[in-house]
Image (spheres, helix red, strand yellow):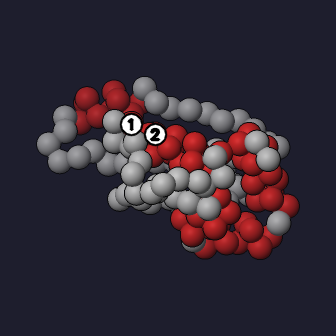
Amino acid sequence: MSGADRFTEHYRLLSTDPAMRAQLLADPKAALAAYFGALIEGDYRIEVIEQRPDTITAVVPAPPEPGVDPAARRADVSGRVYDMLHSSGIGGYLIPNETLTWVLRDMRALWAADGVTGDADNSTSGR
């Protein structure tokens, strides 16, 4: 199965298989590692929010780090506001910073290669 087909199949399963969906909601890292065969090691969390037909889901930006100028933080956060207006369902990732962007890219590349790696701890994240 090609990498793109693998991701499409995963989204199909999440939308149709209650057990797969429950596993992802209960323990996202374990469910993703089990399905794709590997995860990139690191100090990060994965949180899954279930989309429901009667609920608007909002993602609230992380609070500023201590010592960060509030006006600069507000300008930074307000420059990254996205409205994903889809009533038929949407799947994807919201990534809060550049480091985690590389973690996700590395994970997707690993998954597309069927989880085959010499050592999942040796990621190219944190560029």
Q: Amino acid at mark 1?
A: Glu
User: Which type of secondary structure does the marked residue at label 1 adopt?
Assistant: helix
Task: Return the mark for residue 57.
Answer: none
Nearest to the observer: residue 8 or residue 123: 123
Name the residue rendered at 39%, 51% in the picture. 122
Asked whether the beta carbons under mark 2 and mark 1 sit within 8 Å of each other, the answer is: yes
Q: Which residue is mark 2?
A: 101
The quarter of the image holding the C terminus is top left
The quarter holding residue 43 reads bottom left
Q: Label 2 sits on what residue type?
A: Thr
Q: Which residue is mark 1?
A: 98
Residue 4: x, y in percent?
74, 40
> Residue 40 in the image: x percent, y percent?
46, 55
Visible residue check, residue 58: no
Dot 2 crowding, Cα within 10 Å, few <14, some 14–19, many 20+: some
Q: Is residue 72 left or right of residue 46?
A: left
Tell me the quarter of the picture where residue 112 sits: top right
Which residue occupies 29% across, 34% down?
73
Residue 81 position, x and y percent, is 50, 32
Residue at the image position 42 percent from the left and 30 percent from the top: 78
Please state if 69 lies on the left or on the right of 46 as rendered: left
Image x and y of residue 125, in percent: 39, 43
Q: Residue furthest right?
A: 16
Residue 70 lies in what quarter of the image?
top left
Helix, strand or loop for disc 2: helix
* Number of disc labels: 2
| In the image, residue 31 above or below residue 113 | below
